[in-house]
Amino acid sequence: MYLEGKIYAGDQLLSSAKTKVVRKKDVDFTKSLDVALVSLCHTLNLPNLFWFSKNTREFARYRQTIFSNEQFSDPVNFTQFHIKLLED
């Protein structure tokens, strides 16, 4: 499984990356996903983000969610950050 992230300014794709979601027997899926998200944000040089309940609902239902630029701890120069869980 991979977590893919894409950064957009309006409808223009600025950058993208993906990272492997490593599953271990003694670690639950949520923690594995959290580690992958932190790694993805680090790869894309993103500040800390705020995960809201709408992100949980979207991710549980569609295996993807969108973060607005207001959901970051520091100002950013893009409008949206999309993440999507991809199967191998």
Image (spheres, grey):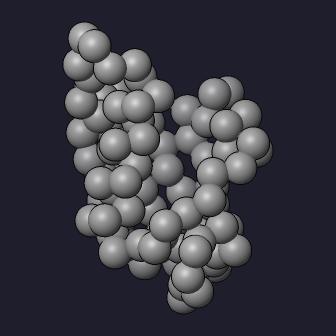
Quadrant housing the N terminus: top left
- Is 31 displayed left or right of 27 in the figure? right
- Is 32 displayed left or right of 59 in the figure? left
Spot occupied by residue 62 in the image (x, y as percentages of width and height): 63, 32
Question: Residue 74 appears in which quarter of the rendering?
Answer: bottom right
Q: Image height check: is 76 above or below 41? A: below
Count of labels shown?
A: 0
Q: Specify the farthest residue to the right.
A: 54
Q: Image height check: is 66 above or below 22? A: below
Tell me if residue 58 can be seen: no
Question: Residue 61 appears in which quarter of the rendering?
Answer: top right
Q: Which of 68 and 50 is in front in this view?
A: 50
Spot occupied by residue 14 in the image (x, y as percentages of width and height): 43, 78
**Which residue is located at x 71 percent, y 50 percent?**
52
Q: Image height check: is 17 above or below 47? A: above
Tell me if residue 75 can be seen: yes
Quadrant housing the C terminus: top left
Q: Specify the farthest residue to the top.
A: 25
Q: Image height check: is 34 above or below 17? A: above
**Which residue is located at x 37 percent, y 54 percent?**
38
**Which residue is located at x 29 percent, y 34 percent?**
21
Q: Nearer the viewer, residue 80 or 27?
A: 27
**Which residue is located at x 42 percent, y 41 percent?**
34
- Is 42 displayed left or right of 79 in the figure? left
